[in-house]
Image (spheres, rainbow, N blue to C red):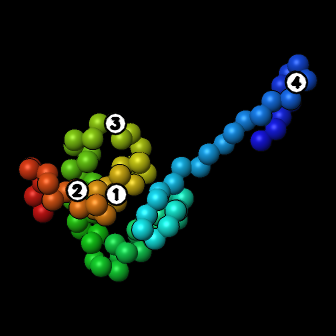
Amino acid sequence: MKYDDRRGKIRYKSTTEQGFSTKAGDMTKAAWRQQAEAIIRENGLESLLEDIKAHCRKYCAWLKKESELELYAMGCLASRAYESWEDFRR
């Protein structure tokens, strides 16, 4: 992106969009989230996702926003990370 600063000098600003690289291809966060929500709904994993979110609320203090927590929990569900948590009970 090209812009002029206050002194009239031309500056360039690069913008990057964070995304995910999967076996299905590269996706933006929004596309990945939408696809993950659909898969969770289709397979009836909503209760497991809620359990993972509750666990993350307790142990993941760096997740401040609910949207960050939900995205992180979806990632844990997709990668089956919850299976290696000692104190996670389903």
**Label 2–label 4 contact, CB within 8 A:** no
Q: Which residue is pictured at 12% across the width and 63% down the height?
A: 90
Q: Can residue 50 be seen in this view?
A: no
Amino acid carrying mark 1 in the image? Gly
Coordinates of residue 75 in the picture (x, y in percent): 34, 57
Coordinates of residue 80 in the picture (x, y in percent): 23, 61
Name the mark on residue 75: 1
Q: Mark 2 points at which residue?
A: 81
Q: In this view, does 50 lie above or below 65?
A: below
Disc 4/disc 3 C-alpha distance (Å) = 39 Å
Amino acid carrying mark 3 in the image? Trp
Name the mark on residue 62: 3
Callout in the foreground (1, 4): 4
How crowded pointer 2 is (Cα within 10 Å; few <14, some 14-19, many 20+) is rated as few
Q: Which residue is pictured at 88% across the width and 24% down the height?
A: 9
In the displayed structure, does residue 15 sit left or right of residue 49? right
Question: Mark 4 or mark 3, which has the lower sequence index?
Answer: 4
Disc 2/disc 1 C-alpha distance (Å) = 8 Å
Q: What element carries label 2?
A: helix
Callout in the foreground (4, 3): 4
In the displayed structure, does residue 88 sit left or right of residue 14? left
